[in-house]
Amino acid sequence: MDISSIAAKLGLNNTKTLIRKAAELRRLSDVQFDSSIIGVGEVVKAIICLEIAASRLQIIFDRSAAIRMSGMSDKAYIRCFNTMQNGIGVKARLDVRELAIQFGCVRLISFVNKVLSLYKDRFLAALPASRRANTDFSRPVFTAVTFFLCAKKHKLKVDKHKLIELSGTSESEFLTIMNSITDLCFDVIGSSKEKKDTQGVKGHRELLDALPSKRLRQDDSDASDDSSIDIEDDIELPCYKKHKQMEKEEYMEWKSSKL
């Protein structure tokens, strides 16, 4: 099946420029990339080339229809798409302004650019000088993640899965970069709720760590002073408490019988 037939089935009619570009990418993939590595056939390769060409020419492409035609799952298709795109050296482009218009968050444009610039500066400052030259922030996933975090900061709903699809990345990589940006720019995009939750977890951990020693002190006081045990009937006791109570009752019975 040739590219023009696949394009017609995907609803991409009368797009000669797109078909020409997709055919060029397909020839490039035949030379530079071995599709057998990712286990895809010629039809899937043609579909992926069409999507890459559509994204570069800013033509609307129905990925769900392409996935159905390929016979692959969503995750498998995205993984093959990313591998093939990197294999032929084609970088996807993602603009903050376009994202803001698409998701209806135009007021976030300046804030996203500010956070992205701050993250780059802080990330590079943490690296040794020998590694700074090899750092690449041009990948669209950085823009997508920063946009998502800024929208979250302003309590605006943005489809994370749609951003993952637009940036041509995987969910695991998206989450990894999101954690990195959150750590380095928490003072700008972090929320007090997240900070409070972290302190709460720490507080609970400290409380749990203190329980064994507290229990030990209670046991010592119980052994030295019989009146130190105060047990309510409606509270279920731990096993060691029940055992200690039974021992005390038996001792009191023995003591009263002797007296």
Image (cartoon, helix red, strand yellow):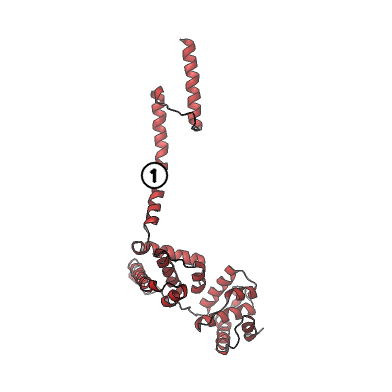
Residue that sits furthest to the top in the current view:
259
Q: Residue at left 36%, top 61%?
A: 186
- The front one of 166 and 131 is 166
Q: Position of residue 112 (x, y in %)?
A: 38, 71
Q: Secondary structure at mark 1?
A: helix
Q: Position of residue 17 (x, y in %)?
A: 55, 89
The answer to whether 193 is drawn above or below residue 104 in the figure is above
Q: Position of residue 208 (x, y in %)?
A: 42, 42
Q: Position of residue 214 (x, y in %)?
A: 39, 35
Q: Residue at left 41%, top 69%?
A: 146
Quadrant holding the N terminus: bottom right
Residue 43 located left or right of residue 98: right
The amino acid on which the numbered mark 1 sits, given as a three-letter code, is Glu
Quadrant holding the C terminus: top left
The answer to whether 139 is drawn above or below residue 228 in the figure is below
Residue that sits furthest to the right in the current view:
1
Q: Which residue is mark 1?
A: 206
